[in-house]
Image: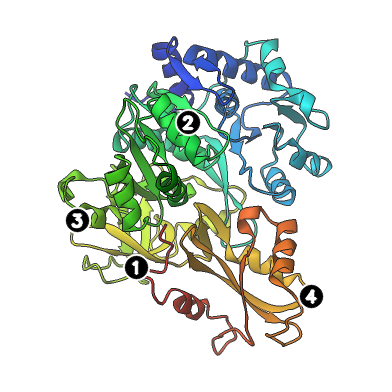
């Protein structure tokens, strides 16, 4: 028997079996059952349909981790609309590009972010504007609670599992972000995989420290809901509040970038808060491994169980984990060495590390190759970018998505990321394009040439560093200050992309053909590090 895999079934299941159970603790203090969440999602579906939104139309969601985000996402997808979550840390120019690129017809935006959309309203194709506090914002916005009260009757269209249901925008190696197209099928199978590997059940209490816009919250808007677990919503990251909430709400599971773990550790050192409620706590962290000291504090002092996972927006995101108990003893300090690795593939996920000829590197923990992956959770492709899609799946090995990360493989087949092939900086869990920063800085008259690389950072893992050749040729008095560079970037880019680390140089290292040798700059910056990717 074949049954289509549709993301709408996650909320349908929660309503059917857990309808009277508390499904969401809102940032406003409200406690909503899954039946109530479902009714509100139905109201949003009906409101969009009444305003002309049809199957296939893109609808954006610009919201921190509130119950509105969950309701809007499911309301969109129940219509066969394409859920297009936006990174709320972007600036109007970046929103303008995405909304135009995706051809977004409607947007729901949290009241804290409507002003940024208002600034570009006349330059985007969007026709429908909805917010959660219309009386407090400027411009013509409809009130979410009012529109969902109009009706809960809508017609759910026929949907197929190979149809695109979400587009998630990610920073690329070029200045413009790319829209990652994900189908019902890949979202559903990814949610099944994290349900297994992250051990999600109806007894879980999930704390939203991870942004919902990040690859649909790493798929947790689906997995947590479908399993009937409880969502604890947030409007931001505050260490004291997180510890208090873990204890008061008996949180059992959360995801946290290494930078969030660092914030929690700093507060823990100062205040020595309680760290667990009635439930044991497990926490997933992703990407470059946290330092071993962080792992020790989280497990030995917080008393939480840490799972290290890895992936990218294009891959679900999650494709590997180092959480395989047969490889280590929970009481053995040697477990931290293995937990620092990105690990081995999820079920049904084929992970390879290949050389420039597409051949697998030996499992000697020394030979470097690029990570490539094949699995059912991998994206359909990039929206309106067929050439970028083709390159992503065919560079070294045909039919595998190329991660752009360089890794070694140990005798167990567990990978460990050592370097990056892509021009990407991952700072505090956010992707930053080096080329986008360079293009921005080139626009300043005082800058003749520039190269941007990742530099190690204790707080963020890595941070952008710009090597700048001043137009006046004087590195001692370059005609521009760091403060002016920061202000110039801040006017044009999201705050997390702003360059705070600058070195003025006479010239950039180049090849015989004039290509900048960024590797030489990176090697110099990371000389005393174990690898050339951020730790922490």
Q: Residue at x 70, y 69 (%)?
A: 441
In three-dimensional space, the C-alpha distance between marks 1 and 4, rounded to whole angstroms, equals 40 Å
The residue sitting at 52% across, 77% down in the picture is 518
Residue 176 screen position, x and y as percent? 65, 57
- Give how far apart the Cα atoms at labels 4 and 3 are: 53 Å
Residue under numbered circle 2: 221
Which of the 4 image quadrants contains residue 154?
Answer: top right
- Badge 3 is on which residue? 334
**Distance of mark 2 from mark 1, alpha carbons?**
34 Å
Residue 478: x %, y % from top left: 73, 81
- Residue 373 locus on image (x, y percent): 36, 53
| Secondary element at tag 2 | helix
The mark nearer the N terminus, 1 or 4, is 1
> Alpha carbon of mark 3 to alpha carbon of mark 2: how far?
34 Å
Secondary structure, mark 4, is loop
- The numbered mark, 2 or 1, whose residue comes first in the sequence reads 2
Residue assigned mark 1 = 369
Find numbered disc 1 in the image and state the secondary structure of the residue it sits on. Answer: strand
In this rendering, would 503 be left or right of 316?
A: right
Tag nearer the camera, 3 or 1: 3
> What residue would you read off at disc 4?
445
Which mark sits nearer the N-terminus, 3 or 1? 3
3 and 2 marks in contact (CB < 8 Å): no
- Asked if residue 122 is positioned above or below residue 515 in the image, the reply reads above
Q: How many marks?
A: 4
């Amino acid at each position: 028997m074949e049954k289509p895999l549709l993301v709408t079934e996650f909320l349908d299941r929660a309503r059917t079996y857990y309808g009277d159970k508390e499904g969401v603790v809102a940032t406003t203090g409200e406690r909503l059952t899954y039946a109530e969440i479902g009714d509100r999602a139905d109201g949003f579906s009906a409101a969009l349909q009444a305003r002309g939104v049809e199957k296939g139309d893109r609808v954006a969601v610009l919201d921190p981790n509130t119950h509105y985000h969950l309701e809007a996402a499911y309301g969109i997808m129940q219509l066969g609309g394409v859920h297009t979550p936006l990174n709320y840390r972007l600036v109007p120019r970046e929103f303008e590009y995405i909304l135009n690129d995706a051809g977004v017809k409607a947007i729901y935006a949290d009241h804290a972010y409507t002003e940024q959309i208002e600034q570009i309203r006349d330059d985007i194709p969007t026709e429908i504007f909805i917010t959660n506090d219309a009386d407090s914002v400027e411009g013509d916005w409809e009130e979410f609670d009012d529109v969902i009260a109009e009706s809960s009757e809508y017609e759910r269209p026929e949907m197929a599992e190979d149809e695109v249901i979400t587009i998630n925008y990610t920073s690329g190696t070029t200045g413009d972000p790319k829209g990652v197209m994900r189908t019902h099928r890949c979202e559903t199978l990814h949610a099944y995989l994290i349900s297994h590997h992250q051990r999600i059940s109806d007894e879980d209490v999930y704390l939203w420290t991870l942004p919902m816009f990040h690859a649909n919250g790493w798929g947790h808007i689906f997995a947590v809901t479908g399993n009937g677990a409880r969502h604890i919503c947030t409007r931001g990251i505050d260490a004291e509040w997180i510890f208090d909430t873990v204890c008061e709400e008996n949180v059992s599971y959360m995801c946290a970038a290494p930078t969030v773990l660092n914030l929690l550790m700093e507060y823990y050192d100062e205040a020595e808060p309680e760290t667990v409620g009635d439930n044991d706590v497990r926490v997933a962290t992703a990407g470059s491994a946290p330092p071993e000291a962080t792992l020790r504090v989280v497990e030995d002092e917080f008393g939480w169980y840490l799972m290290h996972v890895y992936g990218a927006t294009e891959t679900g995101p999650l494709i590997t984990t180092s959480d395989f108990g047969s490889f280590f003893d929970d009481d053995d300090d040697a477990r931290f060495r293995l937990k620092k690795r990105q690990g081995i593939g999820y079920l049904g996920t084929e992970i390879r590390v290949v050389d420039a000829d597409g051949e697998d590197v030996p499992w000697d923990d020394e030979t470097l190759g690029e990570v490539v992956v094949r699995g059912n959770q991998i994206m359909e492709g990039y929206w309106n970018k067929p050439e970028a899609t083709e390159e992503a799946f065919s560079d070294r090995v045909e039919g595998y998505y190329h991660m752009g990360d360089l890794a070694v493989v140990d005798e167990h087949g567990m990978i460990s990321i050592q370097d990056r092939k892509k021009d990407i900086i991952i700072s505090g869990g956010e992707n930053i394009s080096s080329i986008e920063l360079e293009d921005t800085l080139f626009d300043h008259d005082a800058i003749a040439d520039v190269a941007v690389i990742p530099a190690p950072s204790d707080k963020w893992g890595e941070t952008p560093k710009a090597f700048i050749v001043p137009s006046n040729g004087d590195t001692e008095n370059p005609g521009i200050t760091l403060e002016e560079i920061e202000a110039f970037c801040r006017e044009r880019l999201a705050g997390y992309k702003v360059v705070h680390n600058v070195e003025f140089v006479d010239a950039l290292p180049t090849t015989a053909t004039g290509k900048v040798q960024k590797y030489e700059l990176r090697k110099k910056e990371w000389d005393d590090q174990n690898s050339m990717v951020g730790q922490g």
